[in-house]
Image (cartoon, coloured by chain):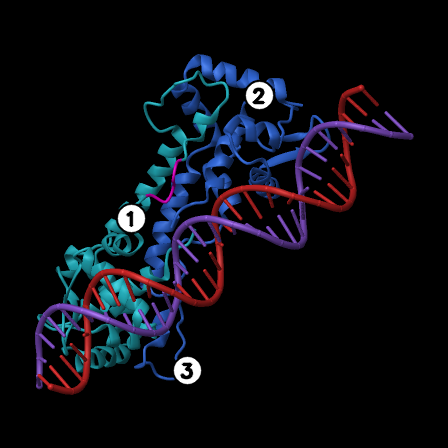
Chain colours: A cyan, B blue, C red, D purple
DNA sequence: CAAATATAGATATCATATATCCGTAATTTT
DNA sequence: AAAATTACGGATATATGATATCTATATTTG
């Protein structure tokens, strides 16, 4: 059970978009070059973010993406779920229903304890991701990235932003 | 990102084995019939449990599996990891290294904030699973299962246990 | 009008999950 | 001693999803 690589891509892209000045857009092409990713496939991840309403897109030359909300309003979970989907990581096939000892026509009123426990673990995972805002990520990244590199990167970005 | 169905199978099987009297064994065949699962494939899950040291197996007619520890000593995480593996659900490809602004030969001293945050979420998920013992599961299952069905099931099991 | 862009759909490739089959060694039952 | 039953490992097959590319279309900029 491994998360799609698109999750990592989307998080990095959002961190970059968070540093983009109001009203400017960054293209898929620029984001792909910056992270060394396949442009066409990265595009799918960005479309997921767009459909989830996390980013706003615009067409034409000088088009691309910008955040649709403030970095404080965007959580890790928003981004992860936009790409990975919102369904739970544990799927209950309700195999207890196959028990040959069961009376015919017996119907379960609620999911069994196994599913509930697995879903609770799923929920703490989501809650942990919900507790981190994109703005928190940007702070941490700016702190751990060498000053010069951080500055050069956003210069590079600004040169390509429409 | 979905957990293998084997995870659910392994949890149900362990719950059954927890109700088995000291020194008795239950075969793959019986466990497969009880849960309506493909015998050969379920066997792979049970082998994973065996290799992880969670269950003990014995050969020959009247052979099969029993728990290798007390239900209080076995956690959800033990069982999940035996089947699903212990590696993290987020794999960091370190795409920041592809940044064209990077000075040549630059080497990262530690994983970036994105990986650390994702791994923290992974850890709370694991911790939640670690907090539930197999004995807790059995208690909850016995409480939510109709008395008669519970009784019939273990009668059925005892009839097939070696 | 020409170039650049996001978007959607179709397709191809690869890895993994799911599933089955077989042979072997060990053990119990007959 | 023979036969039946079992766990186990390896090989193989199939289905599903992740990864990746390509094309066509509509939109916007210059």
Which quadrant of the figure contains the C terminus of chain B?
top right
* Label 2 residue SS: helix
Q: Which mark is residue A20?
A: none
Image marks 2 and 1: residues in contact by CB distance under 8 Å: no
* Label 1 residue SS: helix
Residue receiving disc 2: B157
Q: Nearer the viewer, mark 2 or mark 1?
A: 2
**Marks 3/1 same chain:** no
A70 sits to left or right of B138: left
In the rendering, at what x and y percent does residue A130 appear? 24, 49
Which stretch is magenta? A88-92
* Label 3 residue SS: loop
Residue receiving disc 1: A128
Tell me the crowding category of disc 3: few under 14, some 14 to 19, or many 20 or more residues within 10 angstroms, Cα based: few
Separation of marks 3 and 2 at Cα, in angstroms = 63 Å
Separation of marks 3 and 1 at Cα, in angstroms = 35 Å
Q: Is residue A136 visible?
A: no
Q: Nearer the viewer, mark 3 or mark 2?
A: 2
Residue at image location 37% in from the left, 62% down from the top: A5
Q: Nearer the viewer, residue C18 or B59?
A: C18
In the rendering, at what x and y percent does residue A109 appear? 32, 23
Residue at image location 33% in from the left, 37% down from the top: A120
């Amino acid at each position: 059970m491994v998360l799609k690589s698109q999750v990592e891509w989307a998080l990095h892209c959002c961190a970059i978009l968070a540093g983009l000045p109001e009203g400017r857009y960054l293209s898929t092409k620029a984001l792909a070059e910056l992270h060394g990713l396949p442009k066409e496939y990265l595009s799918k991840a960005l479309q997921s973010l767009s459909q989830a309403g996390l980013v706003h897109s615009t067409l034409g030359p000088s088009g691309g993406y910008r955040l649709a909300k403030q970095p404080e309003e965007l959580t890790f979970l928003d981004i992860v779920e936009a790409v990975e989907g919102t369904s739970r990581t544990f799927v209950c096939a309700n195999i207890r229903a196959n028990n040959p000892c069961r009376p015919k026509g017996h119907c379960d009123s609620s999911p069994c304890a196994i599913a509930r426990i697995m879903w609770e673990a799923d929920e703490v995972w989501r809650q942990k991701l919900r507790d981190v805002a994109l703005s928190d990520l940007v702070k941490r990244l700016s702190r751990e990235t060498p000053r010069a590199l951080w500055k050069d990167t956003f210069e590079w970005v600004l040169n390509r932003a429409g």
